[in-house]
Image: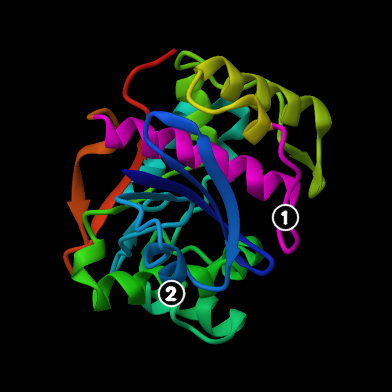
Amino acid sequence: MWVAGVDGCRMGWIAALMQVGHPASAKIVVAPTLAAIADAPEQPAVIAVDMPIGLPEQTEGSGRIPEQLVRPLLGQRQSSVFAIPSRQAVYAAEYGEACRIALATSDPPRKVSRQGFGIFPKIREIDALLRARPDLVDKVFEVHPELAFWALNGGLALDQPKKVKSVPFEPGMRLRRALLKQSGLLSDALIASPAPKGAAADDLLDALAGLTVALDLATGGGQAFPDPPGRDAYGLPVAIWTLRRLS
């Protein structure tokens, strides 16, 4: 069985694929669409993707329930968990329009961050894909790298950032690579792999974090926030997943 950890990147999506139980089989690919990864020759049975799945029609408080549950666990890293606005705002074509819709569909009223708006095209892509392909709904799981590293770190928030002022922070990158190595789930060669063309080093690191969650899910693990997951208006699951067994 193949599984995949996936993150968005400049050229589309970066995926770390691996056969369960066979670390040497791992490969890293960059694809233009998430559908291309789902339909790759490996046909991954579990796809753990660092992108929101399941959009609200209205938002209350500081975002979706998964975001509200996960943030307190991450300490200083909680700002990496964006508040996702309503589906109408996510589908807005322009930033000003997204802010206007978000204000009208949130309580308390909340605009959209520029950084959050930047990933809206990928959120729309995965939302449209899962609504058009019900066969993928039970295979694709929302993850967040910092929550994966929280689990790999024994349920403790990391004390080093991954990036500082949008630039990779090497001490934080080393810490996360060490946690991946400590997990025993991935080969040293995979963890040390350079990022492929079209993706950055932190994109690859996030895909590898997703891969650890995918491997855990494929072997009967995984824990969801919330548990059980919620459902949006189209029946898509609303939860952020991580590894079940803390190291």
**Local crowd at mark 2 within 10 Å, few (<14), some, or many (≥20)?**
some
Badge 2 amino acid:
Arg
Please tell me whether mark 2 sits on a helix, a strand or a loop: helix
Residue 139 coordinates in the image, percent (x, y): 27, 54
Magenta residues span: 192-219
Residue marked by disc 2: 124
Identity of the residue drawn at 53% across and 75% down: 121
**Along the polypeptide, which appears first: circle 2 or circle 1?**
2
Numbered disc 1: secondary structure: loop
Q: Amino acid at mark 1?
A: Pro
Q: Position of residue 26 (x, y in %)?
A: 53, 41
Judged left or right of residue 240, residue 153 is right
In magenta stretch: residue 202: yes
In the image, is 46 to the left or to the right of 117? Answer: left
**Residue name at image x 55 percent, y 21 percent:** 157
Which residue is painted at 30% across and 35% down in the image? 217
Q: Which mark is residue 196?
A: 1
191 magenta-colored: no
Q: Quadrant of the rendered structure where residue 86 is?
A: bottom left
Q: Which is nearer the eye, 225 or 16? A: 16
